[in-house]
Amino acid sequence: MRTSLFLFYLLISLILAVRLFFFYSNQPQFNDGQIINFTTTISSTPKIYQNYQSLYVNLSPLTGVLVKLSLDREFNYGDKIQVSGKLKSRLLNSGDTIFTMDHPKVELKNHEINPFLAVIYSIRQNIINFFQQKLDIASAGLLLGIVFGIKDSLPKEFLTQIQQTGVMHVIAASGMNVTMVSGFLFYFFILFFKRQIAIVLAILGIVFYVALAGFEASIIRAGIMGVIVFSAQIIGKQKFSSHTLFLTVALMLFAWPEFLTSIGFQLSVAATMGIIYIPSLFKRFINKFNEVFIITIAAQIATLPILISNFGNYSLFSIITNALVLWTIPILTILGMISAVFVFIFPLFALVLLYLALPFLLFFQKTVEFFASVGAVLIIPEISWQFVISYYLILISIMVFLYEKVSNSRNS
């Protein structure tokens, strides 16, 4: 059995390696001053400034471009557009280089948009507008980030504070959101339908939520995991979570090879692996009081080199900040999700739920602002990929050693 499983994993890995090789070796190259014409879909809300608006869109699966436009035209999340103009290469303060386009020719192609996605985009925008009208900018942005992973409306200063204090992961829709959605839908539908039908309807609900959250790498992974793991939990097969994660990652990378270089995808997978494996070493020590703290540490350990290599800093109070605010996330997620539903059914009740969420949002904000003001942020110079690999090899070695020790103590 183990030999067959190993050969199966090896075959999947080889197929995936071939897919990634051909994808990355055949990517188009772009140059400063190049005249281009491409069609893309707006995947984030346009940012409005005093004299112009900007869109960040995909030029290719691996290359984005910041498009600067006048205010006389309105563009929305989900619009399909054709862009023609000249690329400009721009060096950022961080040392990274991005492409920009100033006032290119843009033509709307909304008649070509998928009708299902058009409905999703409309629902999404109505929810965003309602939240932003009823709450202050920071609170609305934080709740939208927690529930749907929408970061566009967060004030830049508060977003920086979230990053500095190590709680960036809470404003990305994740497996927890999918678990809540699927669980709520299943137990709701089971009241009216047979178990098998309730499972199917819950899975359809997950697909709808993934679309509503914007098809980001983390939520797609969580959605696929949710569909498989949630179904497995119902039929009593929870022990296959490791295999499910492997197959989910392989499936995602085969379908979307560009996710391999996505920071969000890397963090999502690493955090999930940390949460699956590390806490299981301390099962006898885990209780309802320290569970959140242990899971937080596990996720931090698993994602540390990715965070450092991409952001160049790490807050010494990250674990404490996470432990203080994570208890509010399930509450805010539930209130935010139910409020989003009632925006279209009974807006007054949706407003009441938003006001109930406000104290928890303010607690989250003040906690993050306090620890961001304290500082204690380690500025770490650029680290090599060899260091990242070495870190994970050492971590895996330690975990294997501890697993064997725990196994031997149980058998003795």
Image (tube, rainbow, N blue to C red):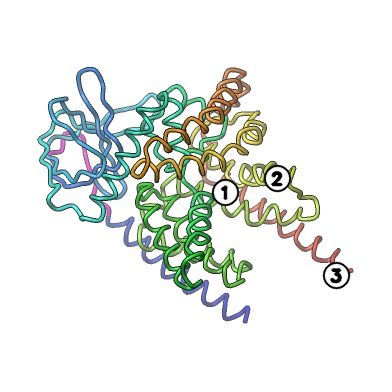
Query: In this view of the protein, which residue sits in the foreground, 104 or 323?
Result: 323
**In the visual, does 182 lie left or right of 274?**
left
Circle 3 sits on which residue? 411
Q: Is the Cβ of the residue at disc 3 closer than 8 Å to that at disc 2?
A: no
Query: Could you tell me which secondary element the residue under label 1 belongs to?
Result: helix
Query: Could you tell me which secondary element the residue under label 2 belongs to?
Result: helix
Circle 1 sits on which residue? 271
Residue 188 x, y percent position in the rendering: 49, 59
Amino acid type, residue under disc 1 in the picture: Ala
Q: Which residue is at 31% across, 57% downward? A: 25
Residue 20 x, y percent position in the rendering: 38, 60
Query: In this view of the protein, which residue sits in the foreground, 264 or 179?
Result: 179
Q: Which mark is residue 294?
A: 2
Magenta highlight on residue 100: no
What's the magenta region? 27-35
**In the visual, does 243 lie left or right of 151?**
right
Q: Quadrant of residue 15?
A: bottom left
